[in-house]
Amino acid sequence: MKSLENPIGVFDSGVGGLSVLRAMREQMPNESVIYFGDQGHVPYGPRSMEEIQKFSEGITRFLLEQNSKLIVVACNTASAAALKYLRGRFPDVPFVGMEPAVKPAAETTKTGKVGVLATPATFQGALYASVVERFGAGVELFQHTCPGLVGQIENGELDSMSTRRILEDALTPMLEKNIDTVVLGCTHYPFVIPLIQEIAGEYVRVIDPAPAVSRQVRRLLEAKGLLNEAGETGYTEFFTSGDSAAMEMLLPKLLGVGGDVQTVNWVNELEIILR
């Protein structure tokens, strides 16, 4: 039986979903959150659909064991590969996933040219194809997979020279084609928006999908009578299948919180697979 006080479960292949968590904290401060970063298997981008579905199912079961009332698949790659699968496996669980923000980009671009940064799995998935088919008519899309960028962000390198080079390789050809909008199709990428903006210039709009995803979470909770707007500020509990100490060190940098960050709990990655 779900109650208002139950937490929201959020998962990603690593720390990227923290960009969604950050937006949720701003919009729904009373909600508690269980966050799982599957850093034992990051990155998801090069993995097969079957692998990602297996990991996503195990993590979902783990989050449900923590009494999560809603699951946010805060990972574009996992959403592309596993969201439909998860809804079939857990028909009574409300899910919110990610999709590249092609629609708002198409509605606001002046030049009709839009850059999309995402992982190979996202670009190859049916979800992205569907979004482009529905909302991309009349807009020229330029795509780049930004190889290595997820790893840089996982290591906390948000403004290093090597991170800059990855982004320059992706953005320079797009800028030469006169794009005026950049869509971020990976939840890791909002953490390098300042660097993207520096490279692209002030006249290029960068779309962070996290606030819109947070609003969808709120709408779904309201519709199901599960939105918690009373009481104290909610708690956040962190889990990882990777290096818990490394994730602990990254949290203040990515979430902008002080030294009182809660401990990150380690979960054996094999335990996740076998759930």
Image (cartoon, grey):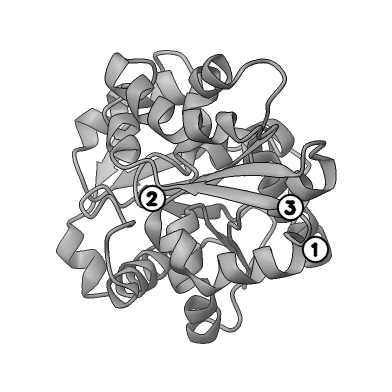
Q: Position of residue 122 (x, y in %)?
A: 46, 60
Residue that mark 2 sits on = 36
- Disc 2 or disc 3, which is closer to the eye? 3
Residue that mark 1 sits on = 225
Taking the image as drawn, is residue 73 in sight? yes
Q: Amino acid at mark 3?
A: Val
Give me the residue at 54% from left, 78% from top: 84
The residues bearing labels 3 and 1 have C-alpha atoms spaced at a distance of 39 Å
Instruction: Name the quadrant of the N terminus.
Output: bottom right
Q: Position of residue 227 (x, y in %)?
A: 75, 53
Instruction: Name the quadrant of the C terminus.
Output: bottom left
Label 3: how many Cα within 10 Å (few below 14, some 14–19, many 20+): some
The residues bearing labels 1 and 2 have C-alpha atoms spaced at a distance of 25 Å
Q: Between residue 269 and residue 117, name the one nearer to us.
A: 117
Quarter where residue 168 is shown = top left
Quarter where residue 165 is shown = top left
Q: Secondary structure at mark 1?
A: loop
Give me the residue at 83% from left, 40% from top: 108
- Disc 1 or disc 2, which is closer to the eye? 2
Left/right of residue 139 with respect to residue 85 in the rendered view: right
Quarter where residue 153 is shown = top left
Q: Between residue 85 and residue 48, name the one nearer to us.
A: 48
Q: Amino acid at mark 1?
A: Gly
Taking the image as drawn, is residue 233 in sight? no
Tag 1 or tag 3, which sits nearer the N-term? 3
Pointer 1 with pointer 2, Cβ within 8 A? no
Is 56 located above or below residue 189 in the figure?
below
Residue that mark 3 sits on = 139
Label 2: how many Cα within 10 Å (few below 14, some 14–19, many 20+): many
Tag 2 or tag 1, which sits nearer the N-term? 2
